[in-house]
Image (cartoon, rainbow, N blue to C red):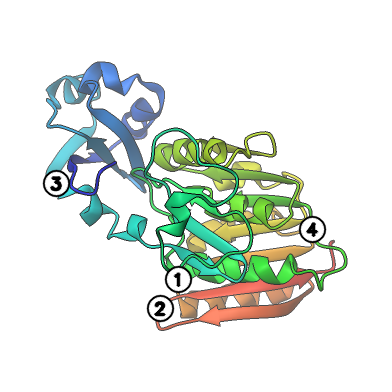
Amino acid sequence: MRPDTLLSIYELRATTAAARGFLDRSDLKSLVGPQLEGFHWEEDFAFLFCSAPADMDPLMAAAPGLELRMEHLLRYDEWQDGAGARPVVAGPLSVLPWEGEGLPDDLPGEGARSFENYQGSLPPVWIDPGLAFGYGGHPTTRACLGFLLRIMSPRNRNPPKTFLDLGCGTGVLALAALRLGGERALGVDYSHLAAECAVRNARLNRMESRCSFEYGQAAARAGSPAEVLMANVPLAVHYELLDRKAYSGRRYLILSGLLPREAEELKCRLERELAFRELDNHRDERWSSWLLETDGR
């Protein structure tokens, strides 16, 4: 999507469970129009993204319990805060924006060389964020990329092969894990926009045979087998995953999405319920992230 594309963003509130379920089940394009590009949930609020102004009356009439709160008009680069224009480099790994047509070459091509900061010795992870967040530049994502580099380092004689990414966003962490030598990855996100975007990015990187992405709640996949569990999610979701024993039976945990005080609160509970060793951590003025090694039980 071009940086100067104008987006009409409609903010809706679901006042009932039925209203929220209506958006998940319905063919929204038939109600909103072909300009609908996707939608994203945040608690009881939904944001519908349209490439042109839309008539919301048919949708509101079909779904009692939905409130139209306001309409936002933003340029695409304002929505993404410019994230799609900057490469992210972490050791041999580069995450680069893809704005072209078709699929890039496996090896860096003209698009990659156009970025002065491109330094990676591996083929890059190409990300088209679309309307979802999670390009790779957020401090929590950068921290998690650094943790992946550590556990996938050649110095680790037995690097993990399987990964579960809960709250996967655009799929950047799962795809980076595969680029670093992983064999299989599964990502889940409770945002239609993010899940659909991650599927596109798997195809963009020609990794669709080794990874899959799906829409759904993180807790619903708590029991999915994987050596590494990555969860860049809010504290409430971490607690739900703990209740579902999602962190048990893993070799490594990469945990993020936490304010410093929340991280300490979660660590206290982890110490009561799980045997682990803290391999690394990253903390700035706003976010805390951890890399933990467990006993696999």
Q: CA distance from mark 1 to mark 4?
A: 24 Å
From the viewer's perspective, is the residue at label 4 or at label 2 nearer?
A: 4
**Which quadrant, please, contains the N terminus?**
top left
Question: Which residue sits at x=40%, y=23%?
Answer: 25
From the viewer's perspective, is the residue at label 3 or at label 4 nearer?
A: 4
Q: Earlier in the sequence, mark 4 or mark 2?
A: 4
- 186 and 243: which one is in front? 186
Question: To which residue does mark 4 refer?
Answer: 160
Q: CA distance from mark 3 to mark 1?
A: 26 Å
**Which quadrant, please, contains the C terminus?**
bottom right
29 displayed left or right of 292? left
Question: To which residue does mark 1 refer?
Answer: 139
- Say if 233 sits above or below 72 in the image: below
CB atoms of marks 2 and 3 within 8 Å: no
Question: To which residue does mark 2 refer?
Answer: 286
Q: CA distance from mark 2 to mark 3?
A: 27 Å
The three-letter code of the residue at mark 1 reads Pro
Instruction: Determine the residue located farthest toward the right in the rendered image.
Output: 157
Question: To which residue does mark 3 refer?
Answer: 72
Where residue 213 sits: x, y (%)? 57, 38
Could you say whether the residue bearing mark 1 is in a helix, strand or loop? Answer: helix
